[in-house]
Image: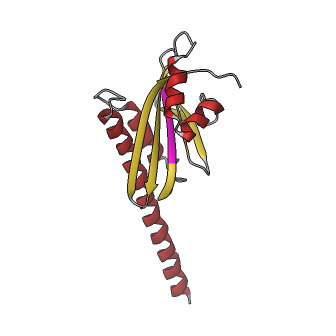
Amino acid sequence: MKCKRILLVFWILLFFSAYSSAQSTLIQDISSEISKSQLKNKVKKKGYDFYENIRKQLINMDSLNFLSYRDIVFFLETFEYETGITHGMIWNKHKSLAYQYFHNKFNFNGPSLFDKKTVGLVEMWNIEKIKSYGQESKLISPSLYFASRAIIKQKEISVDCIAFNEFYLSQ
């Protein structure tokens, strides 16, 4: 009886370990596809991908374990030159993760830099409206935002990316 329990615990641990490893691989693949798409579509220039490095750190911290094999995931990322803080938000229909990254440390407790209307437009993937608002931005020194959408169907990942100027819409 004791041997059966040990065997059962072993199989459960093995299953969850394999699931966690597969999920980590999926998230790494999504991050890599985002970087490739941004370079291919000239959303970003070649060179060191700072945002991918941050996403890899989040993966290693197991902070993105809410993503699944049938999912649509959205990413918003920006860097504030004035403060040196990187802001990011990653979400699907079930959960979201907002973070600030500064001096190799994450803060998950602060408010998200991204307002509800911007997040909503990205979630609807209304590129025309997003770009229009970004071009008409009245902000003096708007940050450059990077938005990505990953559609996951089993092991197939489709990624779209855009860059736009920060804008403010009255609530």
Quadrant in the rendering for residue 44: top left
In this view, 62 is above or below 80: below
In this view, 104 is above or below 20: above
Q: Nearer the viewer, residue 112 or 144?
A: 144
For residue 76: magenta? yes
Residue 102 visible, this angle: no
* Extent of the magenta region: 73-78
Image coordinates for residue 21, horizontal then vertical, percent? 42, 60
Image coordinates for residue 61, horizontal then vertical, percent? 49, 46
Image coordinates for residue 30, horizontal then vertical, percent? 40, 47
Residue 167 visible, this angle: yes
Q: Residue at x 61, y 48 (%)?
A: 95
Q: Where is the C terminus found, in terms of image quarters?
A: top right
Q: Nearer the viewer, residue 40 or 132?
A: 132
Image coordinates for residue 151, horizontal then vertical, percent? 45, 50
For residue 91: magenta? no
* Total numbered labels: 0
Q: Residue at x 58, y 42 (%)?
A: 97
